[in-house]
Amino acid sequence: MNHTAITQYEFESAPVRTIDIDGDPWFVAKDVCVILGLTHVSDACSKLDLDEKGRYLIPTPGGKQKMLVVSESGLYFLTFRCREASEPGTTPYRFRKWVTAEVLPAIRKTGRYEAETEMKAFNRPTKGTFAFLSREFRGARRLASAMGLMGGKAVTAANTAVTAQYGVDCMQMMGVDEDQFYTFGFPDHEASVKAWLEERADVGDPSAQTSLAALFADFEEWHRHNRDEAPLGRRTFSGMLRALGFHVFKRGVYLVARMRLKQEETANGGR
């Protein structure tokens, strides 16, 4: 079997992923079952014939995963298993009408469901669309953090994943470019933090960790004597450190890993 890239549609803010196999659309069974209220995907697909189901690598925020997909006849079988699919006004009923009256006829006629229809939820966002993107973005960011990325790097990695998966550049949609994000819109503040780091902090020692409160107090004191721009708050200071690649974590109090003040080194005998 030959298959092409994944196409994702939106049904009432719920993703419906399809894959072209030998010219025919196959549907990700999990997406269909979620909409139909069928909780056990494998059980729901167990009675399908072998030529009505298969497993293919599907891109997800966590990487490519082998997922069950069903053919058009398999989709009909799942739909008819849901009693509500024949009850007007229910979500399964609207899904059945959407697939049979809009999606499949459009694919047969043009080779795809029209892009404007496919992406209308993202081009004219609704509350449901933002909730869906927010959930997926948080998941992608947690994955990036688990991979060791921190702060702004984790956010931009998550944005890259969501853009690749769903075709939506969240940062662009929110009017934030990558450079602006990394500097929080305050280039002077970024320069101040970098200058303070170079003059007052020792970084790179894996065993070092210093309380965020102590670092911010030292930064405030240094800033008063060396800078003219308005001071930044502790939260922005913390975010700036994260954006510059430092790990800020909580263990009773907030700590910054791999960093200590140079005055600490002097007090401890130049350690």
Image: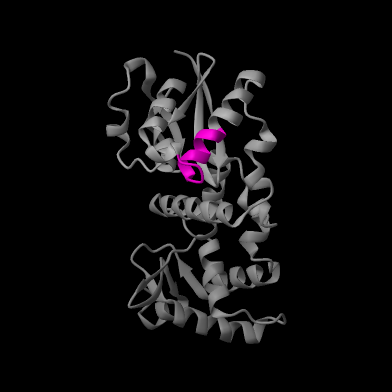
Res 103 visible: yes
Counting from the top left corner in percent of width and height, residue 254 is at 40, 75
Residue at image point 65% right, 68% down: 191
Tell me which corner region of the image, top left, top right, bottom left or bottom right, holds residue 106: top right
Residue furthest toward the front?
Answer: 87
- Does the magenta-highlighted stretch encompass residue 92? yes
Q: With respect to residue 108, does 116 lie above or below?
A: below
Left or right for 110, reference 17:
right
Say left or right for 72 vs 187. left
190 part of magenta stretch: no
75 to 256, vertically: above or below: above
- Name the residue nearer the viewer: 23 or 154: 23
- Tell me if I can see residue 153 in this picture: no
The structure residue drawn at horizontal position 28% and vertical position 27%, both measured from the top left corner, is 46
* 11, 96: nearer the viewer: 96
Farthest right residue?
A: 228
Question: Can you tell which quarter of the image residue 266 is in?
Answer: bottom left
The overriding secondary structure of the stretch rendered in magenta is helix
The x, y position of residue 115, in whole percent, is 67, 33
- At x 67%, y 52%, the residue is 173
Foreground residue among 100 and 226: 100
Q: How many marks?
A: 0
Q: Position of residue 203 (x, y in %)?
A: 46, 66
In the picture, which quadrant includes the C terminus? bottom left
Magenta residues (range): 87-98
Instruction: Identify which residue is drawn at 50% across, 25% down.
Output: 19
Q: Is residue 97 above or below residue 155?
A: above
166 with respect to 150 (left or right): right
Q: Nearer the viewer, residue 59 or 259?
A: 59
In the rendered image, residue 162, in percent from the top left (x then y), is placed at 54, 45
Q: Quadrant of the N terminus?
A: top left
